[in-house]
Image (cartoon, helix red, strand yellow):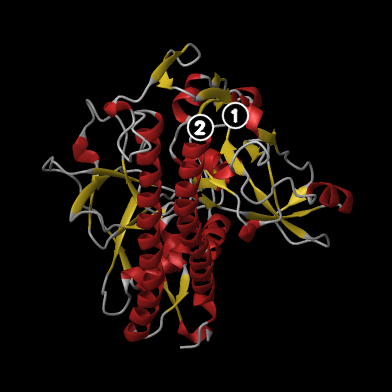
Amino acid sequence: MKSSYKELGNYIQPVVGRNNDLADLPLMGLSIQKKFIPSIANTIGTDMSTYRIIEKKQFAYGPVTSRNGDKITIALFNDYEKALISQAYTPFEVKDTNELNPEYLMMWFRRPEFDRYARFKSHGSAREIFDWDEMCNTLLPLPSPEKQREIVAEYNVIQNRIKLNDKLIKKLEETAQAIYKQWFVDFEFPDENGKPYKSTGGKMVFNEELDKEIPVGWEVGILGDYCSKITKGTTPEKMYTEKTETAIVKYIKGESLKESHLFDVEKISFINTETHIELNRSILEEYDICYSIAGTLDKFAIVDKSILPANTNQAIAIIRVDESKINKYFIIGLFLSNWQKEYYRFNIQQAVQANLSLETISTLPIILPDNKILTEISNSVKAIFDKKLIADIENRKLEEFNSLLLSKLATLEY
């Protein structure tokens, strides 16, 4: 099988083009998610002729690896026909795409094994560099062009399904946001005749806590009064990311909340049994809301059975609804609708990074409708959430399958 491994340098070459003509092109950067992203760099007064030009189907990578943790910034460019990138990046291209498919090569670069290899081969004192020679010395399996296309096609089928689910999830979240705005901001929920409440003369009363009118019979409370628990996790003192004699448990950090519908769950093993046993008394239950209280404050996810049991660190607030007091889907809907964003952002505590206290989480004002409207909105949110959860779980399974496909690239028989 090793006979099918080839040195990458035989198939790639550097791209040396500079922006000498000062072309008006998009300026792009690279992320550790191995994607090109629009650059936010301030280029006023900058000599743009020093920037490099990258074209579609070309690659770029950041040779400095000591700043990115375990990830290598490398990506295949497909966003535009041409763009500009910083001279800090090294652009390159495949010499002959009939021998090496660029998308197949990008699959190889997405493997965590490649990240580990590049970090191991990096060298330097003040900065560790994975230089061009080391990139060219990289070995990878090179099946026939037909087999490469087959592997890429299989990978893309899964990626396209994930993207389709992401669009569905986004649409469902937008629907929840629209319903909550219509019912709890504009107060245009359907009255007993099915007509918009406020615009058809529904009775309103001034509420001092919110400093505005709300429908007669509605009340204002705070989130903490309707939750059985608002707490946060802890970071274990002694843990490894390598497998040990102790059991491996699922662990969620603040940065694990990728989007409002996704967790990036890590598997952590603990150095001693006592620490493991204590933390493995899972503090998470199904439908708990995990909310980021450090850094990006608007990220949250709702726990489902597929990731339990699991533990969290102190960067996540765990919000558990008391169902003896209120329907959990009403509170879930509040978070899906971004009800909390403005209040929490106004009350953040600025230190090294933005933080929210558990007290601030708890004192979120919420408008409480009458029982009829509460039941209707909860049923609507449940229907939205159930569809969203199915798509979310399917995406997690598809991502696991894609990770397995990438890891098996090195073991395939050609």
Q: How far apart are the alpha carbons under marks 1 and 2?
A: 17 Å
Q: Circle 2 sits on which residue?
A: 370
Amino acid type at circle 1 is Leu
> Which x, y percent locates residue 353?
54, 26
**357 horizontally vs 1: left or right:** right
10 Å crowding of disc 1: few (<14), some (14-19), many (20+): some
> Which x, y percent locates residue 182?
34, 35
Considering depth in this image, is 25 or 322 the residue closer to the camera? 322
Q: Circle 1 sits on which residue?
A: 223
Image-quadrant location for residue 22: top left
The image shows residue 90, relative to residue 214, as above or below, that is: below
**299 horizontally vs 241: left or right:** left
Which element is circle 2 on?
loop
Which element is circle 1 on?
helix
> Which x, y percent locates residue 190?
35, 38
> Which x, y percent locates residue 28?
29, 45
**261 horizontally vs 148: left or right:** right
Number of callouts: 2
Which of label 1 and label 2 is nearer to you? 2
10 Å crowding of disc 2: few (<14), some (14-19), many (20+): few
Q: Residue at x 21, y 32 (%)?
A: 47
Amino acid type at circle 2 is Asp
